[in-house]
Amino acid sequence: MRWSTRGEPRHDDVPADRPVLIHALDGFLGAGSASRLAAEQLDSGGEVVHAFDIDSMFDYRARRPTIAFDADHYRDYDTPRLEIRRETDADGTEFYLLAGPEPDFRWERFFAETKDAVDRLGIGLVLGLGAVPMGVPHTRPPMVTAHGTRPELVDRQNLWQAEVTVPSSAQSMLEHRLGEHGYDAAGYVVHVPHYLAQIEYPDAALALLDAVADRTGLRIDTSALQARQETTRAEIEQQISEQGGDDVLHGLEEQYDAFARGAAQSLLAHDEELPSGDELADQFEQFLARQRKNDQG
């Protein structure tokens, strides 16, 4: 059995007797489905302490929920839910989990409701989990960028030091707004290989869970995710070999290693330094197609 645990929390400036609220939404910061996979591992089926009015926040036509058609009738409609649950880790330590689809609408209302829940539940730290596609190879350890509403809450040194303007998300807005109101909020964003951003990538979810355990001391059983990780890795390696993608992968490895040594400024390299989207799509097309078929089966 595999556990994500690192013992005692790192930060004395966040009261140890106040629980943490972890938010992992399925949406813009969801490359490799890492945040959703992490949320599934954190979800122990705890009590719902707050349910958002997702019907007013969800774009049904852009992200249509699934429903089964069985011979002559519909069944098993996958109702979207955005909830805060009271959870416990393997040692019975209490924490809260905010999970579900990222709101498409009414972000300020989403923030206001979350802030009210933070006050009502006595939350000491709000911790966000996300994932973004990046020019990194799957053969290197996932890179995690830490962030927070004040420097003391950033618990690791980031290799990524650039300033960049990016599209916002409900999660990033939530952290920013909480900081404006004097709340402690932080989080982690894992960098997912851009050629694997559209499939479930367990390595990235495990990196997020390890960061959570390292910070909070929560003990999380990740054995099921570990088993999926090994299977996915084998599938990726097989497809790279069959598609002749070794040269492209080697180029990404060299770029990553140069960045890690400080010899490169950014993983957002010039277009001619990275394989094109078409090149990557050709090399991994069979793998992606099989993964999507397995996910839907």
Image: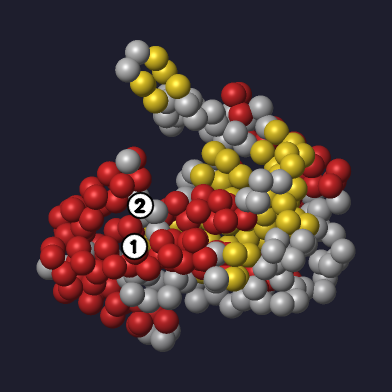
* Quadrant showing the N terminus: bottom right
Characterize the local packing of mark 2: few (<14), some (14-19) or many (20 or more) Cα atoms within 10 angstroms. some
Residue 227: x and y, percent? Answer: 43, 65
Badge 2 amino acid: Ile
In the foreground, 42 or 69:
69
Badge 1 amino acid: Thr
On the rendered structure, is 24 left or right of 278? Answer: right
On the rendered structure, is 264 left or right of 225? Answer: left
Q: Which mark is residue 199?
A: 2
Assess whether mark 2 and mark 1 are in contact (beta carbons under 8 angstroms).
yes
Residue that label 1 marks: 232
Residue depth check, mark 1 versus mark 2: number of the one nearer the observer = 1
Residue 168: x and y, percent? Answer: 53, 46
| 285 relative to 274, above or below | above
Residue at point 31%, 47% (across, down): 294
Q: Which mark is residue 173?
A: none
| 97 relative to 209, above or below | above
- Secondary structure, mark 1, is helix
Quadrant position of residue 101: top right
In the foreground, 264 or 228:
228
Of labels 1 and 2, earlier in sequence is 2
Q: CA distance from mark 1 to mark 2?
A: 10 Å
Is residue 154 something that shows in the picture?
Answer: no
Please give the count of numbered marks on the rendered protein.
2
